[in-house]
Amino acid sequence: MSLDRIQLLRNVGQFDSVNEGAQLPLTRLALIYAENGRGKTTLASILRSAGTGNAQLITERHRLGAQRPPHLVLAPRAGPPLVFQNGAWSTTLPDIAVFDDHFVAQNVCAGVEIGTSHRQNLHELILGAQGVALNAALQVHVARIEEHNRTLRALSDAIPAEARGAMTVDAFCALAARADIDGEIQEAERNLAAAQSADAVRQAETFSAFSLPAFDTQSIDALLARTLPDLEAAAAAGVHAHLTKLGQEGATWVSDGVRSVSGVSAGLDHEICPFCAQDLAGSPLLRHYQAYFSAAYDGLKRNVAQQIETLNNTHGGLAALTFERSVREAEQRRTFWGAFLQAPEIIVDTAVLTSAWAEARDAVADALTAKQAAPLEVSMLPEVALAAIAAYEAAKVDITVCSDSLLACNAQIALVKERAATANVAALISDLTRLRSTRARHSAAVAPHCAAYLAEKGAKTQTEGLREQARDALNNYRRNIFPAYQGVINQYLGRFNAGFRLDQVDSVNTRGGSACSYSVLINNAAVPQTADAGPSFRNTLSAGDRNALALAFFFASLEQDQQLARKIVVIDDPMTSLDEHRSLTTVQELRRLLPRVAQVIVLSHSKPFLCNLWEGASIADRTAIRLVRAAAGSTFAPWDVRQDCITEHDRRHELVTDYLQAADPAVERQVAAALRPILEAFARVAYPTTFQPGGLLGPFIGICEQRVNTPDQILGQTDIAELRALLDYANLFHHDSNPAWATQVINDQALVNFAQRTLAFARR
């Protein structure tokens, strides 16, 4: 792709409304000549903007005083035109490469100073399109990571600080969920409480079993059913019948009387009745009474009395009070140990229990009391007593279950005591804090914030992986491109005959991004880019050196471009501060570049420079335009390069030749005046050592005569004579040798003769 024409420039720089360029085609080599201030830099900026799409390069050159914004139309050789209107291009030509002051100021230096931006821009220049793409891909990931960081900061701020405490956000969000977190926290709180109360834990009692006695109904029934086995049934019946007649206290009264017989019969040879003193030998009941009220009878009575005593001791009021006290103690211990372990609640209705207990006890007591009153009477616990005992036993079941559950805690209590004795309070506090943070982390209010943070962190990790891949790709590319670029740029510096080379051209990573670093090598001594004191780029390179370096950078970057064949290369006034040799080298490099690119556009104020380019180019490949003044601005015009390229010597030679072909009296005096300069130009070129610039032919002829027939001979005698004759005629038409030169009569035949002889002499 190349540009074909500049169709319209309106309201930009020196161009008011210029469409003359539409009739001036741009070929493969397009030369644009202009004096300074006519608009070359504006054209270069327009072409740069067309390549980059940077509208500011044009808007900042809005023509002063113009009411409307810039409007530009560039016509490429193929495709739709490029139109700049309303502050934007309709399309761009990305293959335009421009060398101008802007290129130097961006990529090389600003005046004599090299800044960070220069090194960064030069870095991209060296990288080329492929490297810039790799670097751009890297910077996208770097920028994305910065976005991740900003998002992570916002998401971390959304996590309540009171929830995570002293933990970092990353550590807090990494806490894993636990199935029974509330139970674990409760356990940790108990362990901590036990450790903080180690002395009290060590001294505290464990649970004791609740002791509630049972009623031995079998033994009681057996006692109630006991009688005297040695007493005959008939006698016992008789005694019992008699005693019945005596009433409730009859048995006691008779028993006391039987025991008194021996006492009242003392000293008698027979037993008498303690009541009536009659002889008892003939009493039929005495033997039965004695059997009835024997030791066995007393034992039975004692057993009944003991049973009643046992009942009172085991099931009496004191036993109930003791039980109630044990329940209160258990409740106190449960309150204490409840702070360190899961202790079951004590749900005991002591009032119900003691009531059932008392009722059962009273019922049994009534049965035993009746037995005590009638020891020989066979009985058993009545249904009322058995029902009361059953109610009591039913109430005991709940007490037993409660007691067993409390006793089961004693194993845990032993473990609590053991842990409390060796516990690390600080560690327990830390564990409890972590558990509470875990619960807070996975609470409904906090979990969504942590999930969002972790998701963003995971996305950042993925982006970091992409960044490392992009960095590796860029570094691999750099390792190849920078040494190659150093070699190419030093080749160009050699062609420019620069007295310096570049060394250690390399890529460095800075806070602002990737940059190019290099040293200037002068006399094999490295000169840094910047230095607070001593040699540096600023004080060791002349203006010509800096411009040569900039050109070398530009040409070297083109050499590295894989799309070079598609490039439109624009050069704006490359001759600034360049000496004659470097100007010639620039011409040679542009000639060498021309067949390798799509188009070369050169803008300059130097006609000799442009003429050199013109003369070396193919007629089919070259066009020339000049920027000329038009009112208060500039416009395009054709440029006849040939007229500006030929020298005065060429014009004089052409003038004489044309006169010999066709005499023109109007120019015969000019022809006669041209003969001596033709001879002087010949002598200066043919004998530069002897005929110095500014010399005269007369003294030169004298020197030639002196050296005739010597090793240093310049001209032979015949040539000397011819040259003197030619000079004598030519001097007639110059004021320094003939005061009347302006009125000297000219003879056409003589002029033709001397003109032919002069041209012939100059061809020797």
Image: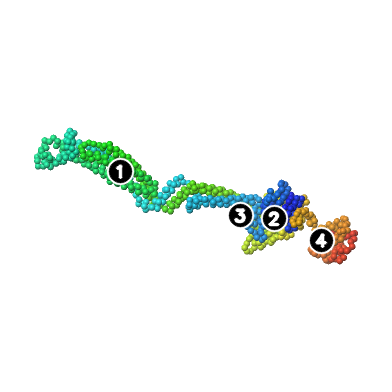
Q: Residue 513 carries which label?
A: 3
Residue drawn 68% across the image and 52% down it: 49
Q: In this view, does 285 lie above or below 211?
A: above
Label 2 sits on residue = 61
CB within 8 Å, label 4 to label 3? no
Q: Name the residue that disc number 4 marks.
A: 681
Q: Mark 4 or mark 3: name the one nearer the start of the chain.
A: 3
Q: Does label 4 or label 1 sit earlier along the sequence?
A: 1
Which residue type does callout 2 highlight? Answer: Arg
C-alpha separation, residue under disc 3 versus residue under disc 2 = 30 Å
Secondary structure type for disc 1: helix
Residue at image mark 1 = 354
Res 15 → quadrant = bottom right
Q: Is mark 4 on a helix, strand or loop?
A: helix
The disc at residue 604 is: none
Q: Looking at numbered disc 4 in the image, what kind of residue is underneath it?
A: Ala
